[in-house]
């Protein structure tokens, strides 16, 4: 009997791909990273493939590199694979042409994902796969977790046999991340499918000095074309080979597949052609509509390349009259999307060749659906079938959106549903941190593997990394769960709210059907809770006659040592109420699952969870409620009503999880959005916030400096401004020199704080009577929320300090500058954002930011709102993200514009001197722009200039008007993480630094690919565990600073805010002032280090004290003065490396899992530190001679 | 020939120098070195149940933290096959040490829960430890907790552990008992085979600059011998358990004093940490030379010779001693 497992498609595919290959080249990219992570972990555990050897898994610097490594491994005879998606697949394109051109068997497993166009999207569609359809790779698409598992094997067998390399693809997230119950392939299945002769043939073709050949020649016009045509027969033969593999597979497993699978009425007149997970939706809907007597059918395209006209013709019913072809991609400007064009061509060719079953070519329309994982539901499918019934059906339609701009969209009836009465459909609303998703994944595994039921789980996450809301969609019941779409409005028979405050934010009961269960985690008892919930919730409970249960899960968690993890408690309630298993059995299974999940972390963890399970049911109560809704509480709008219209109406709709209903006309056409929008999204995620004690405060500004979310601010101002201050607004005498104003206030934004506690941790002032208290102390937020909101709003009315009026050379003064980066959705206590915020404070009003893809682009620009902000004059950073790999070049391009247009403006200015006035022209051209004060003066001059230009009709004047802003100094900052700077973008970064241009690079070095979940980069230090370095990284961290210093003309600084904030400030100011390329490498503590984030700054200090992170500044300007350019800003290492490292899980977990290796690597790491320190010290001692012309 | 052998917890030891619980026992090699240097037995570093629980919970917390919150980063760490967060690595180390050395190895345990004490004690026994030393370190801070309640709980705990074990059991005590002899007697009645006097705690200090409490561990010196010396002398002959003196043993004179007071063995750490394991040979040589010079045949001969019950003026170990010291001090000042 095959083993039944409940897993997602990434794991399902990796389980096969790992077993069938010898070399696996990987690189992280969402949503495919999981496949690489599984492979790396299995390789680290020395799990063998089906031929008894452990595959070699190599992480590369980019997908382009992975493809190159795959190509090389294939050329030398290894069975090789890789995993990727989206931009990653695009980076592989050049090698894909080569691999296919050389008829080399391999399979690239791709979780299909949108390609970045007007915006990046991590979600699923076929735009990446369609972009590689000309490479010569076969394209085999699976539509479910089971198919992805099966096709991983079928594609490998077919590739080896046909010599055509394959992309095996499945829908990103919808399939890659859907947990479903599948039948697992055995090693015997795999051995039976793979013909040894095809492996031998592959190895025989390999490069081997024993029988040398040459491959990869350069060919000329005389023969290239002919040679290119030699492959035709292979492509002609390929479809039959794939079908043979499918047939062989069917005999082994009983699961039957075809290149084009038809489902529907034998006499169907209307047929939909579709690929990927959407095909399941169409098929299930077709099944439903057939029962209503409709004559319809669906063709699922599995083998898209090579496209077999013959097989498509065989699949189509002879009765077909009209066809709708659905593409999950967009090809702007084309006659139609790719699948549509292939189908249309095939119909004509099939008819021409006499292969067609029909006498008359059916009418064909094409449509787009599901871009970026847009929902594709049975209601939409019905609308498409209905459209085919029309006399003039809409061609090139869209479905699933409201296109009120070019009117492409089909209308559909959202209330149409095909839910089966015997399935259970559950929707859970949880907080990321509370473990809801993990528990639901376990629940689905339990149901899938311990019952006869089919089971499916899909999980939706929001766009924030702190305080994020998760929505879990679980289905189970008799038969397979083939529903690759979310549980819809009025469809859920179980709705659970794991966080009470969500009731005010989300209309979650819209999901509930009549008579459904509503489970609420509530601190209010079953007798008190009714009056505490919003009136909208009350109304739905009454009107839908819901069975309403409450449990105080936080209380149970607290009493059983679970902290904020309420997962097993809510899971226990779910099983108890749903009755999917007998209660005792369910509890036993939950405990078994706890043991399996947490057992290796220690008995204490297991016991704690067991205790939570055991204490749950006694606290679960049904609520008896009245039949009238009387609550005075209401669901709150997601965005303040004071916000600008676009923010309130469009972004606001996204905030309340209703973005699907934003019409096309409301969206910007070119991906351009206003900044300063995060201020309107009050998330209220902090249970505690810092409260200021003016008596203790020394006004050092450190708390403001380190706040990752810019929620703690300070101002110095005239006490007269306090006249209208709220009663609880605090102030004290200012202790600042050279700053106008006698009064000082430190104010917290109570509704934006994430309660990370970094501010309290860094505060150096202690209460002299109670040393446990500082100048700021955490206190519960709810009781002071309203008063502090008023105080914050009043604080905002106090004018910001004029930056031109103060010296910002001290940490204290610098923090009087308004942050132009505020309230980001970064992790609470993020180590990156304080640097980004500082950049925005110091230079934000004249900065253009090029931001590499990664954490900083996500917390910087993931809709709905952005933290990039503007000052009182409307100026602020202008920001853009191009790609992951090209950020340095992207930034350089910006610099080139600044340089060129500044020069152009100066040229125009000179040529218009007579008309503008020579004095103004001279003043502008000769203006010093080295301080904020003189830059302000230049702004005024340019404003005057623009007024004059506006009145001039000379075309040159109009040109100058459009570029005059460049006469005021502009700064380009290139910002990104270590994955970009050390790995994928390194080549470009090196070139851009070497260019000599005046650019500033900020590397937010977390030492892993943080955004994709902590994969190793070349910045990962030796001895640390990371994904793709599961055995602990065995080689030292790349010394990027040293490489840059080698040029001799690049300003380089290595900084760690927690170790020396003054050095950090100095480095930023020096880097920006340096007239040439500057590189700042900033230690950024990260959630992926496995630390208490509140101690992040302390860890930074220890990193410096241990010598792991020596801070320094290298200023080439000193060379000309005859000084050594390298200034080391820290003392000799004073603590052992392990005293720093073993505070972090990334190091500690190796000690806990492989002590011998951990000790060896730690010893090596100590040697790394001491060798590097000696080298730096020697470099700092080198005597330089002046090079100003006088020196010999 | 001078006979340095002694007995402790039913074990015959070639001399009274036992290495007490310290980081020196964290590696097989260093235990082997201690054996080679002449140490007669080694007490393993303490297995702290609280630490195991903490490590386990911390690992779980940090592996969970931030997971399943954001679509691109559902986890932040690779899944390891296993973690040594339980007592297994400690237990394995005992087994390995037992395979490598011939001297007795005494396990050391500090528990929190009754279940934990018993479970871990049995594992240590199964690993081959020759005896177990319970480290019942507890600092009462609750004003409602009475000394009797605390002592009752500790006696009950020791009795429970003893019932489950076949190997000898020692208990390492703190000096802070109101009526130590009575408590020692109760422990003996519960089946304890040895008492170790006294535990040396991390003592908090206050940093007046940072206003932080700093836990510090200061290595002992010979002066620290005085406290356990008194209580060994007082308990000798009054309780049936063997006595081990620890804290302040740095040279042969300290060993002699301990033996004369009534100790079966001394447990040494600070001297080894400060000056190396090589001190064992020097101390043993000094001990032997002294015994030769003063014509003592054996350790047994001198054991207890200066105990409370053996000296001419037992009051010297009692309060009078304190008063006498004060008087002498006053006389000097005056």
Image (cartoon, grey):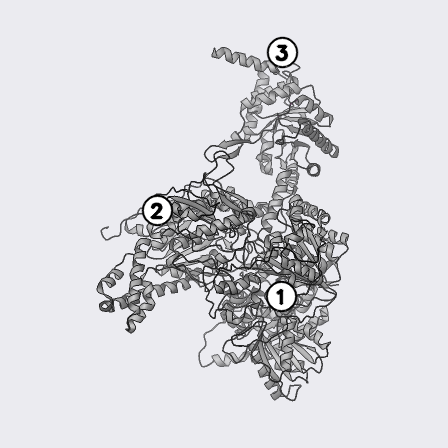
Front-most of residues A1120 and A853: A853
Front-most of residues A198 and A695: A695
Q: Quadrant of the N terminus of chain B?
A: top right
Q: Position of residue A68 (x, y in %)?
A: 50, 65
Q: Which mark is residue A740?
A: 2
Q: Which residue is mark 3?
A: B313
Magenta segment boundaries in residue numbering: B174-178
The mark nearer the N terminus, 2 or 1, is 1
What's the CA distance linking mark 3 and mark 1?
Answer: 88 Å
Q: Position of residue A1137 (x, y in %)?
A: 49, 43
Magenta span has B175? yes
The prevailing secondary structure element of the residues shown in magenta is loop
From where the camera sits, is residue A51 visible? Answer: no
Give above or below for B164 relative to A1043.
above
Question: For numbered disc 3, what is the local secondary structure?
Answer: loop
Q: Categorize mark 2 by other alpha carbons within 10 Å: few (<14), some (14-19), many (20+).
A: some
Pinpoint the chain carrying mark 3: B
Front-most of residues B296 and A944: A944
Pinpoint the chain carrying mark 1: A
Magenta span has A101? no
Looking at the rendered structure, the number of numbered marks drawn on it comes to 3
Q: Which residue is mark 1?
A: A175
Q: Are marks 3 and 2 in contact (CB under 8 Å)?
A: no
Q: Quadrant of residue A662?
A: bottom right
Q: Quadrant of residue A78?
A: bottom right
From where the camera sits, is residue A573 visible? Answer: yes
Question: For numbered disc 1, what is the local secondary structure?
Answer: loop
């Amino acid at each position: 009997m095959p083993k039944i497992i409940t897993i997602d498609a990434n794991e399902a595919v990796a389980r096969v791909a790992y077993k069938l290959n010898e070399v696996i080249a990987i690189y992280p990219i969402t949503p495919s990273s999981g496949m690489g992570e599984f492979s790396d972990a299995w390789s680290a555990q020395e799990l063998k493939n089906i031929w008894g050897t452990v595959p070699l898994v190599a992480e590369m610097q980019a997908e382009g590199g992975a493809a190159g490594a795959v190509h090389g491994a294939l050329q030398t005879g290894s069975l090789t694979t890789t995993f990727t998606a989206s931009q990653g697949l695009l980076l592989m394109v050049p090698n894909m042409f080569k691999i296919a051109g050389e008829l080399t068997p391999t399979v690239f497993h791709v979780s299909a994902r949108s390609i970045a166009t007007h915006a990046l999207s991590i979600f699923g569609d076929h735009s990446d796969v369609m972009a590689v359809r000309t490479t010569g790779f076969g394209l085999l698409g699976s539509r479910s977790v089971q198919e992805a598992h099966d096709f991983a094997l079928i594609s490998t067998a077919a590739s080896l046999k046909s010599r055509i390399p394959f992309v095996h693809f499945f829908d990103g997230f919808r399939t890659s991340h859907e947990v479903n119950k599948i039948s697992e392939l055995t090693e015997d299945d795999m051995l039976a499918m793979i013909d040894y002769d095809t492996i031998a043939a592959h190895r025989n073709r390999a490069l081997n000095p024993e029988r040398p050949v040459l491959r990869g020649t350069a060919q000329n016009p005389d023969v290239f074309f002919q040679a290119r045509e030699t492959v035709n027969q292979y492509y002609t033969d390929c479809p039959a080979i794939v079908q043979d593999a499918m047939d062989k597979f069917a005999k082994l497993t009983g699961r039957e597949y075809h290149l084009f699978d038809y489902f529907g009425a034998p006499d169907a007149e209307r047929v939909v052609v579709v690929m990927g997970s959407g095909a399941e939706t169409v098929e299930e809907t077709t099944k439903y509509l057939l029962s209503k007597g409709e004559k319809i059918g669906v063709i699922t395209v599995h083998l898209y390349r090579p496209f077999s006209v013959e097989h498509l013709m065989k699949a189509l019913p002879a009765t077909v009259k009209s066809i709708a072809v659905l593409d999950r991609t967009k090809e702007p400007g084309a006659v139609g999307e790719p699948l549509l064009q292939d189908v249309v061509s095939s119909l004509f060719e099939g008819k021409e060749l006499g292969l067609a079953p029909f006498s008359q070519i059916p009418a064909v329309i094409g449509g787009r659906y599901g871009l970026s994982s847009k929902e594709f539901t049975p209601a939409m499918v019905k609308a498409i079938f209905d459209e085919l019934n029309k006399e003039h059906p809409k061609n090139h339609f869209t479905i699933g959106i409201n296109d009120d701009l070019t009117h492409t969209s089909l209308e559909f009836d959202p209330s149409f549903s095909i839910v089966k009465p015997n399935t259970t459909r559950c929707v859970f609303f949880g907080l990321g941190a509370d473990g809801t998703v993990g528990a639901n994944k376990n629940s689905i595994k339990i149901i899938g593997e311990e019952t006869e039921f089919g089971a499916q789980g899909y999980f939706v996450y929001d766009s924030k990394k702190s305080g994020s809301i998760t929505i879990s969609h679980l289905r189970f019941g008799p038969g397979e769960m083939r529903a690759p779409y979310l549980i819809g409005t009025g469809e859920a028979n179980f709705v659970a709210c794991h966080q009470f405050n969500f009731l005010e934010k989300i209309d979650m009961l819209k999901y509930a059907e009549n008579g459904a269960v509503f489970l609420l985690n509530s601190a209010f008892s079953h007798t008190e809770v009714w009056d505490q919930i919003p009136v909208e919730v009350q109304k739905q409970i009454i009107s839908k006659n819901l069975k309403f249960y409450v449990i105080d899960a936080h209380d149970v968690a607290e009493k059983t040592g679970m902290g904020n993890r309420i997962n097993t408690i809510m899971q226990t309630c779910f099983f108890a109420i749903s009755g999917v298993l007998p209660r005792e059995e369910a509890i036993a299974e939950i405990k078994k699952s706890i043991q399996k999940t947490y057992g290796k972390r220690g008995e204490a963890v297991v016991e704690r969870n067991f205790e939570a399970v055991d204490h749950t049911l006694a606290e679960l109560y049904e609520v008896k409620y009245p039949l009238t809704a009387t609550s005075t509480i209401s669901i709150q709008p997601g965005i303040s009503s004071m916000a600008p219209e676009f923010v309130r109406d469009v972004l606001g709709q996204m905030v309340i999880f209703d973005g699907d209903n934003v019409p096309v006309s409301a969206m910007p056409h070119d991906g351009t959005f206003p900044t300063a929008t995060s201020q309107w999204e009050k998330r209220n995620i902090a249970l505690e916030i810092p409260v200021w004690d003016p008596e203790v405060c020394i006004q050092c500004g450190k708390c403001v400096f380190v706040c990752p979310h810019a929620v703690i601010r300070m101002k110095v101002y005239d006490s007269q401004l306090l006249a209208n201050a709220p009663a609880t607004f605090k102030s004290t005498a200012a202790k600042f020199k050279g700053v106008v104003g006698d009064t000082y206030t430190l104010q917290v934004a109570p509704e934006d704080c994430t309660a990370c506690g970094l501010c309290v941790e860094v505060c150096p002032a202690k209460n002299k009577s109670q040393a446990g208290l500082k100048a700021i102390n955490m206190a519960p937020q709810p009781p002071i929320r309203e008063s502090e909101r008023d105080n914050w709003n009043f604080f905002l009315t106090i004018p910001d300090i004029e930056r031109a009026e103060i010296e910002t050379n001290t940490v204290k003064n610098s923090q009087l500058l308004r942050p132009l980066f505020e309230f980001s959705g970064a992790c609470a206590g993020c180590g990156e954002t304080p640097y980004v915020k500082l950049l925005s404070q110091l230079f934000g009003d004249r900065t253009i930011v090029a931001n590499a893809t990664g954490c900083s682009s996500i917390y910087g620009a993931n809709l709905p709102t952005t933290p990039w902000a503007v000052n009182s004059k409307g100026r602020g950073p202008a920001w853009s993200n191009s790609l992951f790999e090209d950020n340095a070049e992207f930034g350089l391009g910006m610099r080139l514009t600044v340089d060129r247009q500044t020069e152009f403006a100066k040229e125009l200015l000179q040529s218009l001197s007579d008309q503008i006035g020579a004095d103004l022209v001279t003043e502008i051209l000769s203006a010093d722009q080295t301080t904020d004060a003189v830059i302000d003066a230049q702004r005024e001059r340019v404003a005057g200039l623009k007024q004059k230009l506006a009145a001039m009709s000379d075309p040159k004047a109009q040109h100058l008007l459009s570029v005059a802003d460049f006469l005021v100094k502009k700064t380009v900052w290139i910002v990104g993480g270590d994955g970009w700077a050390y790995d994928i973008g390194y080549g470009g970064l090196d070139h851009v630094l070497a260019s000599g241009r005046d650019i500033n690079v900020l590397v937010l070095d977390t030492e892993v690919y943080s955004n994709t979940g902590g994969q190793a980069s070349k910045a990962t230090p030796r001895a640390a565990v990371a994904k793709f370095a599961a055995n602990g990284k065995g080689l030292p961290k790349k010394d990027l600073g040293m490489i840059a210093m080698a040029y001799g003309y690049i300003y380089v600084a290595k900084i760690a805010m927690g170790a020396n904030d003054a050095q950090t400030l100095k480095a930023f100011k020096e880097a920006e002032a340096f007239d040439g390329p500057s590189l700042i490498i900033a230690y950024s503590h990260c959630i992926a280090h496995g630390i208490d984030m509140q101690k992040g700054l302390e860890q930074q200090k220890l990193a410096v004290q241990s010598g792991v992170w020596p801070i320094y500044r290298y200023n080439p300007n000193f060379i000309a003065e005859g000084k050594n350019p390298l200034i080391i800003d820290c003392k000799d290492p004073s603590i052992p490396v392990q005293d720093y490292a073993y505070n972090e899980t990334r190091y500690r977990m190796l000690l806990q899992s492989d002590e011998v290796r951990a000790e060896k690597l730690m010893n090596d790491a100590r040697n790394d530190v001491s060798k590097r320190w000696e080298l730096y010290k020697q470099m700092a001692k080198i005597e330089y001679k002046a090079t100003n012309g006088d020196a010999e | 020939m001078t006979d340095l052998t002694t007995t402790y917890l039913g074990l015959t030891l070639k001399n009274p120098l036992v290495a007490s619980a310290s980081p020196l026992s964290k590696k097989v090699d260093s235990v082997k070195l201690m054996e080679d240097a002449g140490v007669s037995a080694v007490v393993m570093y303490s297995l702290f149940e609280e630490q195991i629980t903490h490590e386990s919970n911390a690992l779980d917390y940090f592996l969970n933290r931030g997971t399943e919150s954001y679509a691109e980063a559902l986890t932040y760490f690779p899944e390891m096959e296993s973690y040594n967060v339980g007592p297994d690595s400690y237990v394995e180390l005992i087994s390995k040490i037992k395979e490598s050395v011939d001297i007795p190895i005494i396990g050391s345990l500090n528990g929190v829960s009754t279940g934990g004490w018993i479970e871990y004690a049995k594992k240590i026994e199964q690993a081959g430890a020759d005896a177990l030393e319970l480290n019942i370190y507890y600092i009462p801070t609750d004003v409602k907790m009475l000394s009797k309640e605390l002592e009752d709980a500790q006696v009950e705990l020791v009795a429970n552990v003893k019932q489950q074990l076949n190997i000898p059991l020692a208990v390492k005590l703190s000096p802070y008992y109101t009526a130590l002899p009575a408590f020692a007697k109760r422990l003996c009645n519960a089946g304890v085979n040895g008492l170790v006097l006294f535990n040396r705690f991390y003592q908090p200090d206050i940093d007046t600059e940072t206003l932080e409490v700093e836990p510090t561990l200061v290595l002992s010196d010979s002066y620290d011998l005085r406290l356990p010396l008194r209580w060994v002398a007082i308990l000798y002959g009054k309780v049936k358990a063997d006595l081990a003196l620890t804290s302040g043993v740095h040279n042969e004179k300290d060993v002699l004093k301990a033996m004369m007071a009534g100790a079966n063995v001394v447990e040494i750490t600070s001297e080894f940490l400060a000056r190396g394991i090589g001190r064992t040979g020097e101390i043993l040589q000094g001990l032997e030379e002294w015994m030769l010079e003063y014509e003592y045949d054996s350790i047994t001969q001198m054991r207890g010779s200066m105990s409370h019950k053996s000296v001419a003026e037992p009051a010297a170990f009692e309060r009078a001693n304190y008063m006498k010291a004060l008087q002498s001090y006053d006389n000097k000042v005056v």
